[in-house]
């Protein structure tokens, strides 16, 4: 068994990230639409919790 350790320097791997140039309109969410979706979910959650109470 050898006590010799060899250090090898590695070059960093090239990172490739592809960014779409255009946002598809069907996946685009405005702040108003997001707010509306949140309010709908909150209202549905409130209705469910009221039905569950004895």
Image: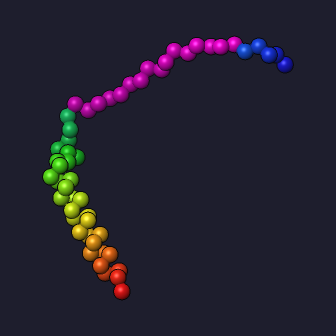
Asked if residue 6 can be seen in this view, the reply is yes
Q: Which of these two is toward me, 24 or 34?
A: 34
Q: Residue at x 24, y 59 (%)?
A: 38
How far from the left and from the top, in percent, is residue 54?
Answer: 36, 86
Q: Residue furthest bottom?
A: 54
Magenta stretch holds residue 20:
yes
Q: Of helix, strand and loop, which mostly describes the magenta segment?
A: loop
The magenta segment is 6-21
Q: Is residue 7 above or below residue 28?
A: above
Q: Is residue 15 above or below residue 29?
A: above
How far from the left and from the top, in percent, is residue 18?
Answer: 32, 29
**Is 19 left, or right, of 15 in this rendering?**
left
Q: Residue 43, located in which quarter of the rendered image?
A: bottom left
Magenta stretch holds residue 32:
no
**Is 42 left, or right, of 5 in this rendering?**
left
Q: Is residue 5 above or below residue 17?
A: above
Q: Is residue 28 above or below residue 46?
A: above
**Is 45 left, or right, of 36 in this rendering?**
right
How far from the left and from the top, in percent, is residue 5?
Answer: 72, 15
Q: Residue at x 31, y 75 (%)?
A: 48
Asked if residue 26 can be seen in this view, the reply is no
What is the image's colouring? Answer: rainbow
Q: Quadrant of the N terminus?
A: top right
Q: Residue at x 41, y 24 (%)?
A: 15
Q: Residue at x 17, y 49 (%)?
A: 31
Q: Residue furthest right?
A: 1
Q: Which of these two is toward me, 18 or 5?
A: 5
Q: Residue 44, located in which quarter of the rendered image?
A: bottom left
Looking at the rendered structure, the number of numbered marks drawn on it comes to 0
């Amino acid at each position: 068994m050898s006590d010799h350790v060899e250090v090898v320097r590695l070059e960093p791997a090239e990172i490739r990230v592809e960014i779409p140039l255009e946002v598809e309109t069907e996946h685009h969410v405005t702040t108003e639409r997001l707010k509306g979706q949140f309010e709908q979910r909150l209202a549905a959650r409130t209705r469910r919790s009221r039905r569950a109470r004895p």
